[in-house]
Image: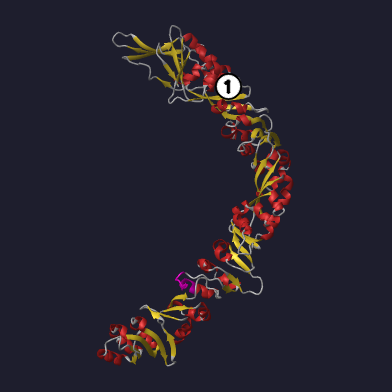
Amino acid sequence: MPTSITLNVANALAYAATYNDPNLYPISIVDNATDIAASATQLRALGIQITDVHVIDTAANINANQANLLSLGNELKDFTIQPSNNYIQVQSTDGSSITTGAGFAARIMAEGLTIPVRIADYGGNIAANIDAIVALGPQLVSLQETYGFNPFTWAIKVTDLLALAGKTIDYYGHTEVFSNVVDSAANVLASLDNLEKIAPQISKLSFTDSTTPNLSLTASQFSNDQAVLNAIANQYTYTVSGVSAANAASVLASMLGSNHIQASTIGITDSTTHFGAQLDSLQININKIKSISLTDSSPIAVTFNQLVSDANLLNKITTMYSLAVNGVSVANMASVLAKGTVVASVALSDTAVHIFKALDTLEANVGKISTIALTNTTTTKETLTASQAQADLAALNLITGPYSLVVNGASVSLAQALLGNTHLSKVGLSDSSVNILAGLDTLLSPNSAKVSSIALTDGGTPSLAVTAAQFANDTAVLNKISSHYTLSISGETSAHIAADVKNSHVSAIAVVDSLANVKANLGALHSNISKISGITLTDASTATLSLMVAQTNSNLSVLNAIQSPYLLSVKDTVANINSFDLSTVHTSLIEIMPTSLTTTLNETRHVSDLNLSLIKLTGNAINEKVYNTTGTEVDIVASANGAILHQLFFTNTNESELHLLGIGSAVVHIL
């Protein structure tokens, strides 16, 4: 082929117009970037007649026209940058970037060219110009090592590797593998996570440190960066921080790298719950545990044995912590509590003999005792005085396990506290009658099965005032009173009197009942009148009690015990009524009903007010005359025939001294 002629763009286009056979008249163009770019379309149209294009211009002009320059394709051969005359070879172009050798990377950067660059060169050249290649940054599209197969054997630093690994391919276009990553341990550690991301491209990593380095790894790095850690060829040591308690053993057993290196020390970071659960297994590796950091402030649950055997491990905790110690015997409690504020709580576990023997001591430290568990397998019976139970109540309520509790001489208030303890089997009470009565219904009666005895502390013989309901319902408790006392029952019905008085402690009964029930039980009331303190009637209105004179006389004490108003209706013969002394009856409302006036009716009680409303006083005249010499007779006479319709008989003749004797056969009311 003929030798090409070198022309600028203008001359080339004119020449090609005359000599347009590319085989006979090839053209080599040398010109500035502006002129070449302006005629890029015409130049491309000349096809193979343009053998090569050489751009001589400033970097600024080249950058401004790079799109049109790159459109020339592989005919674009080089740039000569003005005014420095720096030469940059172009191996090829794909229309959007140029491919050049590694040695030109520094010139591209120095001249400020912004054209996207692909580097294709031998590994040695790449290694020699690695800093300039890395400096291209995003401007570098790709890097190809053109000598043989993987791996890239030339030394490369971590920062350069991270910058280039994703853009580097081998001769055949496969992702490049680096077999000679060389850097300090500090630099490797600083980029460990990023190196792990490209770990498949690293076959060997070596440290440049003059002494054996130590890598301070986090638990996350140890777990997630194993591939790059295993690529390290040097001898090194490492520590792992932030290891969970559960993973401590596996981390310490793991080996890294070709030298099978194990962690020299680890640092634990975990919750108190997880740490406490692994306490014994951590103790096995105590020499390799450097520190322990807890992530919460909850107490660590440990046994007494762990507190002793794992003391050195606990001393490695660097954060604030406290202990909840369980399985502590009474004998060991003092030594545990002597550790001070680090012990948040103590759970005791011991025999009933030891626990109850030390009850006072336990109460003194109850603020730090969480539970007290008995270790005996059979139920034991524990008997305490009231003073012991009162003093050690908080400790007693913490005791669990097989035992029954008996307390003697307890007050009602102490019994109330003790009855909340399910282990209480019996309680003997010793308190005043007032306090016993106060707790009778709500406390003692519902728990009567657990009340063994009751001793009243009042002086003399106290009287217990109870209602009829209490007397009926609380008998089981009242019967347990062993000291002298009497019972005063209120609100009792007449029908229960006979049964009530069978209780020798009953000294007084206040009856509350209807008049009909009182009449029905007059016999029982009369028989026990000495214990009847009063009778209150429940009738809604004034009720009538109808009795004969004999009944009235025999039950006079009962009638006089009635404290409510009622009408006493005495119905009997005149003879019996004449013998009746009304002055003995305390009620102010009496009704006299003679069954016959065949004999004289003598009234011996003064009438202060006479109610004649029930006497039918109808007639035409009233005649008054002397009766039996000293009395007065008042006759109501019919005018038709002079017949006497009604008669009133009075003793005496003086009006102020009139005493009613009788009203024929009619009813007389004396008020």
* Residue 314 is one of the magenta-drawn residues: no
Q: Which residue is mark 1?
A: 500
Image mark count: 1
- Left or right: where does residue 73 sit relative to residue 351? left
Residue 180 seen in render: yes
On the image, the x and y values in percent for residue 242 come to: 59, 61
Please state which of residues 600 and 348 is positioned toward the viewer in this rendering.
Answer: 348
Residue at the left extreme, as displayed: 18
* Quadrant placement of the C terminus: top left
Q: Residues within 10 Å of mark 1 (few under 14, many from 20)?
A: some
Residue range of the region highlighted in magenta in the rendering:
164-174
Residue shown at 37%/86% (left/top)? 62
Q: Position of residue 51 (x, y in %)?
A: 34, 85
Q: Nearer the viewer, residue 573 or 280?
A: 280
SS for callout 1 = helix
On whether residue 172 falls in the magenta region, the answer is yes
> On the rendered structure, is 444 left or right of 544?
right
Point 30% across, 11% down: residue: 639
Query: Looking at numbered disc 1 in the image, what kind of residue is underneath it?
Result: Asp
Q: Is residue 580 visible?
A: no
Relative to 281, residue 553 above or below: above
Quadrant into which the N terminus falls: bottom left
Q: Locate residue 384, reporting x and y percent.
A: 70, 36
Quarter residue 23 falls in: bottom left
Q: Position of residue 255 (x, y in %)?
A: 62, 61
Dividing the picture into quadrants, the one containing residue 452 is top right
As drawn, is 610 to the left or to the right of 385? left
